[in-house]
Image (tube, grey):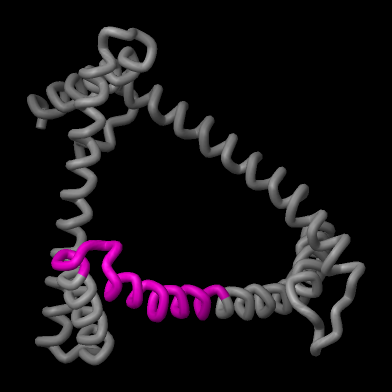
Amino acid sequence: MFVRAPISTAIAVGVGLIVLAALSIPGMNEIGGRILDWAVLLAGLALVLGLVNLLRVHLRRVRERKQPLYSLVLLISMLGTFGITLWQGSRAPIPNWIFLNLQVPIESSLMALLTVSLTLAAARLMQNRLDLMSMVFLVTLFVLLLGAAPLFGVELPLFTRVISPYVSNFLSVASTRGLLIGVGLGTLATGARILIGADRPYDG
C-alpha cells in the first residue's frame, strides 16, 4: 500500500499534466491525443466489464429464482440487441426498428411516469412544507403542465403560447446554464486537486 500509492499518484499527476500541456503547446498535440484515445478505449472496456457484471448478476438471480422473470427479460433483450447490432451494425434496419419501436416508447413511458411522480411530489410538498420556495416550485409546475398540452382538449393560449414558452426558453435555460457553470467549476476544482495529489480516487 505504501509503495503503490506514490506510484499511482505520480502516474495520474503526470498524465494529467501532459494532457493539460498538450492543450496549449502545439508540439504535444499528438501525445495528448494518443492519451485521450487510450482513455476512450479504457472507458469502452469498462462499459464491457459492466455489461459482463450485469450478465453475471442476473444469471445468478435466475439460478436462485429471485424474480427470475424480470432477469430473463433483461438478459434476452440485452443479448439479443447486442448480438443483432454487432452482426448488422448500428444503422441497419433491425437495430433501427428496435430503437424506434421499443426504446423510444419505453423512454416516453418513463417520461410520462416522471410527470405523474412529479405531480404526486408536488401534492406531498403542499401537505408537508409550504414556504416561498415550495410555492415557486408549485406555480412553475402548474404553468408548465398547462402549457405542455391542452387541458381536457381545450387550449389555453396564455399558457401554451406566452407563459410556458417564456419559462422554457428563458428561465429554464438560465437555470440550466447556472447548473452547468457550477458543474464546470466543480470539475475544475476536482481536477486541480487530483493534479496536485490532494485527492486520489484511483487508490481505492
Spot occupied by residue 193 in the image (x, y as percentages of width and height): 38, 24
Q: Residue at x 23, y 21 (%)?
A: 15
- Residue most toward the right? 158
Asked which quadrant contains residue 69, the reply is bottom left
Q: Residue at x 50, y 33 (%)?
A: 186
The quadrant of the picture occupied by the C terminus is top left
Asked which quadrant contains residue 106, the reply is bottom left
Left or right side of 81 for 175:
right
Spot occupied by residue 190 in the image (x, y as percentages of width and height): 41, 30
Q: Residue at x 17, y 75 (%)?
A: 79
Q: Nearer the viewer, residue 22 or 84?
A: 84
Left or right side of 165 for 90:
left
- The answer to if 97 sits in the magenta stretch is yes
Name the chief secondary structure element in magenta.
helix
Above-or-below relation of 75 to 203: below
| The magenta segment | 85-111
Q: Nearer the viewer, residue 50 or 200?
A: 50
Spot occupied by residue 13 in the image (x, y as percentages of width and height): 25, 20
